[in-house]
Amino acid sequence: MDLYILRHGEAEHGPPDALRRLTPAGEREVAAVGRLLARRRRPFDLIVSSHLTRAVQTAEIVARAVGGEAVLRQTPELVSGCGLEEVRRALGDVPEAAAVLLVGHEPSWSRLIQTLCGAQVRMVTGGLARLYVPELAPGAGLLRWLLTPPLLER
């Protein structure tokens, strides 16, 4: 599986956690991710986001930018604190050859990358990682790259 992991863009502080929206800076971060992903030759088969407002906004901005026929799904499985089992449930029976974008939160994404690839990373807001994962199993993946918003905006 060609797995992209995106942490939501910068979000406002103050409202209840589930209702926090992207800030204007967060929207710009995510738009930069969308522009990068729009240049991919292969469309996404599936985009799955946490059901929290900031993650849904992030997924929608990217989905509009990349176009295509990707299924856009929201799930409570991908909230902060989720692990490999929740990701498996969120993905369901996605084919091994699928291209998938996951949109969610910390500390889940850093831990997921470590579980799948052994790489110790810290996913910043608006950060994007690409993994090759032949199966969703500990140590089975390969971290291809990790980009931060300043790199994405260039």
Image: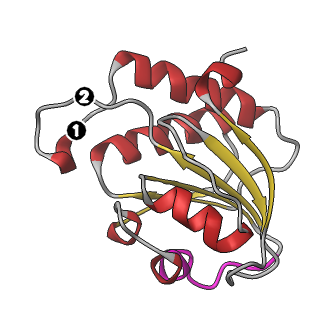
Q: Secondary structure at mark 1?
A: loop
Tag 2–tag 1 contact (CB < 8 Å): yes
Q: What residue appears at the point 88 percent right and 43 percent down from the top-left corner?
A: 41
In the image, taking residue 76 as reference, residue 108 lies left or right, namely: right
Specify whether residue 93 is painted magenta.
yes
Question: In the image, is residue 53 above or below residue 22?
Answer: below
The amino acid type, in three-letter code, at marker 1 is Arg
Counting from the top left corner in percent of width and height, residue 96 is at 79, 79
Seen from the viewer's position, the closer of residues 89 and 151 is 151
The amino acid type, in three-letter code, at marker 2 is Glu
Question: In the image, is residue 109 above or below residue 39?
Answer: below
Q: What residue appears at the point 40 percent right and 70 percent down from the top-left corner?
A: 82
Splitting the image into 4 quarters, where does residue 102 fall?
bottom right
Q: What residue appears at the point 68 percent right and 48 percent down from the top-left corner?
A: 129
For marks 2 and 1 on the same chain, the one whose residue lies earlier in the sequence: 2
Splitting the image into 4 quarters, where does residue 77 fall?
bottom left
**Quadrant including the N terminus:** bottom right
Would you say residue 48 is visible in this rendering?
Answer: no
Residue that mark 1 sits on: 20
Tag 2: Cα neighbours inside 10 Å, few (<14), some, or many (≥20)? Answer: some
The single residue placed furthest to the right in the displayed view is 41
Distance Cα–Cα, label 2 vs label 1: 6 Å
Q: Which residues are magenta?
A: 87-96
Residue that mark 2 sits on: 12
Question: In the image, is residue 115 above or below residue 6?
Answer: below
Tag 1: Cα neighbours inside 10 Å, few (<14), some, or many (≥20)? Answer: some
Specify whether residue 29 is painted magenta.
no
Counting from the top left corner in percent of width and height, residue 69 is at 67, 53
